Image: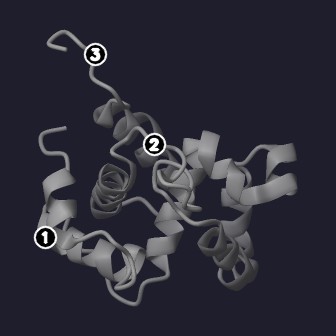
Amino acid sequence: MPNAPKIGLDIKQVKNLIVSPVLKKINLYSESAVNLIIGTAAQESQFKYIKQIGGGPALGLFQMEPNTHDDIWDNYLAYRKDLASKVRALATQKLFFDHAADEMIGNIYYAAAMCRIHYLRAPMALPDADDIEGMANYWKTFYNTVHGAGTVDEFIRHYPRGY
């Protein structure tokens, strides 16, 4: 369909209106972090899927699995009360207490914060902001892991340029 509308969220708006402000609010902002999170959404959901295709458990634009979400809370944020409080402030009241991981489906602020914290747990520094190959390798190692189906080449192909 030649005149079909582009499907998905505007990447520049996601960057400027969601990811950057959230990372500043939780004091974890850097250009590298923003670009890695944008690259993660591009690879994981192409900025259009909020639940894993094919029946898998991953949720939100960043396709984080509920077990990963819960592990971050149980084994990382539980010991970092100030950061936990900032992240918790991004969540809605009822949904968070009913099933916290579901918050990532409709709350991009919260999902972006959780994605950043997932990377914060990695033992290596973030790649440079303009190092797409470095980001791809970082994503594969610490987000998708060796067990994930995604590849470094896919990440590089999906990474948005010029946004």
Callout in the foreground (1, 2): 2
Please tell me which residue lies in front, 138 or 113. 138
Label 3: which secondary element: loop
Label 2: which secondary element: loop
Q: Label 3: which residue?
A: 5
Q: Specify few, some or many for label 1: CA neighbours under 10 Å numbering under 14, 14-19, or 20 or more.
A: some
Residue 66: image x %, image y %? Answer: 65, 66
In the picture, the quarter occupied by the N terminus is: top left
Residue furthest front in the image:
54
Q: What separation in Å lies between label 1 and label 2 (alpha carbons)? A: 24 Å
Residue furthest bottom in the image:
123
Residue 40 located left or right of residue 112: left
Residue 143: image x %, image y %? Answer: 41, 74
Residue furthest top in the image:
3
Task: Report the amino acid beneath label 2.
Answer: Tyr
Residue 105: image x %, image y %? Answer: 61, 45
Residue 39: image x %, image y %? Answer: 28, 56
CB-based contact (under 8 Å), mark 2 and mark 3 = no
CB-based contact (under 8 Å), mark 1 and mark 2 = no
Quadrant of the rendered image containing residue 3:
top left
Q: Is residue 83 visible?
A: yes
Please tell me which residue lies in front, 114 or 16. 114
Residue 93 located left or right of residue 2: right
Q: Label 1: which residue?
A: 133
Quadrant of the rendered image containing residue 26:
bottom right
Count of marks overlaid on the render: 3
Callout in the foreground (1, 3): 3
Mark 1 or mark 2: name the one nearer the start of the chain.
2
Task: Report the amino acid beneath label 3.
Answer: Pro
Residue at x 53% of width, y 63% of height: 64
Q: Label 2: which residue?
A: 49
